Amino acid sequence: MNWRDRLNRFMYGRYGQDELSRFLLIVGFILLILDLLFRIPGVGMIVLLILGYNYFRMLSRNVPARYAENQKFLQLKDRVLGFFRGGRGRAEDLKTNHIYRCPKCSQKIRIPRGKGMVEITCPKCRTRFRKRS
């Protein structure tokens, strides 16, 4: 048996690499470079902990737990990236639309500009209110 077959047999049923693993690897590498350049106390230990946790995740056979961790990471990543991406889209949207909040449930409602006085029905709580668009 060659080394590739042995590695395949060893990795069978293990979780492997995902987005969170790649992120941890990049963070560990960046911290390692910072530690080599600036000799910050304790950073070397943090790098070892990050890489150890990364290998623990990759070699784990508890696939549902690792999958749940990755999903939480992806949700957090989307929220953070959406915050930075959202500003540009919102500015473009405000040129053609008004954004109002429902007085009862505070749901955001987008109304096209230039329609005059309109009666708005909240899609969430069905409250009706009037605003100028």
Image: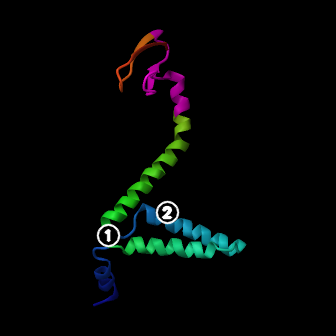
**Residue 84 versus residue 67: which sits nearer the camera?**
67
Mark 1 or mark 2, whichever is nearer to me: 1
The answer to which of marks 1 and 2 sits earlier in the sequence is: 2
The image quadrant of residue 32 is: bottom right
The percent position of residue 16, horizontal first and vertical second, equals: 36, 70
- CA gap between label 1 and label 2 equals 20 Å
Q: Secondary structure at mark 2?
A: helix
Name the residue at 31% across, 73% down.
Answer: 61
Q: Amino acid at mark 1?
A: Asn
The answer to whether the residue labelled 1 contacts the one labelled 2, judged by CB atoms less than 8 Å apart, is no
Whether 96 is among the magenta residues is yes
Marker count (numbered) = 2
Name the residue at 35% across, 61% down.
Answer: 67
The image quadrant of residue 68 is: bottom left
The disc at residue 43 is: none
Residue farthest along the top direction in this orientation? 117
The disc at residue 62 is: 1
Whether 108 is among the magenta residues is yes
The quadrant of the rendering that contains the N terminus is bottom left
Pointer 2 residue: 23
Question: How busy is the neighbourhood of tag 1: few (under 14 within 10 Å), some, or many (20 plus)?
Answer: few
Name the residue at 46% across, 27% down.
Answer: 106
Q: Amino acid at mark 2?
A: Phe
Question: How busy is the neighbourhood of tag 2: few (under 14 within 10 Å), some, or many (20 plus)?
Answer: few
Span shown in magenta: 90-117
